[in-house]
Amino acid sequence: MPGELIHLRGPNGAGKSTLLRICAGLLDPQKGEVDCASEQFEYLPAEANGFHLKLGACQNLHFWHELRSGKKVSVDTLQKSLAEWKLDHPIIAGNFALPVAKFSTGMKRRLALARLVVNGTPLWLLDEPVSGLDEDAVATFISTLRRHLENGGAAVIVSHDTRIFSGITTQLLDIIS
């Protein structure tokens, strides 16, 4: 529901990531069905950020936004999102930008999280979204998540890092192996 945050919790191997993949339509459920249009959600897996490694930050965000919405994204929107995630340095976001392949793990994750905001989908399916992030980026994620929820967005998050749920009304869904 709009404004709702679900924290999928459980031990390693219990099936949390598998459940997210089912919700994203990447795996078929053994029983029942999932009914969610792909333009309504953004899925971010734990170990892949989904970027073309030879392109720069802006080119990747342009590509994903146009793929998802069929529309061009404004340069202002891109710059604002990159700045929020501290990815607005000319080496990263300039005309001769560093390819994403050269980004650190944390920088790639910041860019993936920036993509969530740029794409503007109402539902976020996130698997360990703060993995590899420094404290500053974790704080940015928390404020971004709060803003998303306050604006009527929703999220289902798998995370062993419970700091990200602090002060946010969260529904727990325990997955037991």
Image (cartoon, rainbow, N blue to C red):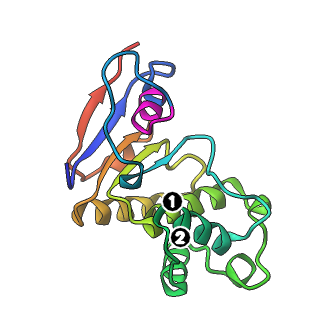
**Which range of residues does the magenta coloring cover?**
18-26
Give the labeled residue for mark 1. Answer: 113
Dominant SS of magenta comes to: helix
Q: Are marks 2 and 1 in contact (CB under 8 Å)?
A: yes
Q: Foreground residue, 162 or 58?
A: 58
Is residue 151 found left or right of 56 in the rendered image? Answer: left
Element carrying mark 2: loop
Q: Is residue 113 above or below residue 176?
A: below
Q: Dividing the image into 4 quarters, which one contains the C terminus? A: top left
At horizontal 36% and vertical 64% (from top left) the residue drawn is 143
* Label 1 Cα neighbours within 10 Å, binned few <14 / some 14-19 / many ≥20: many
Q: Position of residue 159 (x, y in %)?
A: 43, 38
The numbered dot on residue 85 is: 2
At horizontal 50% and vertical 87% (from top left) the residue drawn is 76
The numbered dot on residue 160 is: none
The amino acid sitting under disc 1 is Leu
* Label 2 Cα neighbours within 10 Å, binned few <14 / some 14-19 / many ≥20: many
Check residue 20 for magenta coloring. Answer: yes
Q: Foreground residue, 164 or 13?
A: 13
Residue 136 visible to the viewer: no
Is residue 130 found left or right of 167 in the rendered image? Answer: right
Check residue 154 for magenta coloring. Answer: no
Q: Is residue 90 above or below residue 110?
A: below
Q: Position of residue 37 (x, y in %)?
A: 36, 47
Q: Foreground residue, 29 or 141?
A: 29
The amino acid sitting under disc 2 is Trp
Q: Residue furthest top?
A: 177
Q: Position of residue 157 (x, y in %)?
A: 38, 42
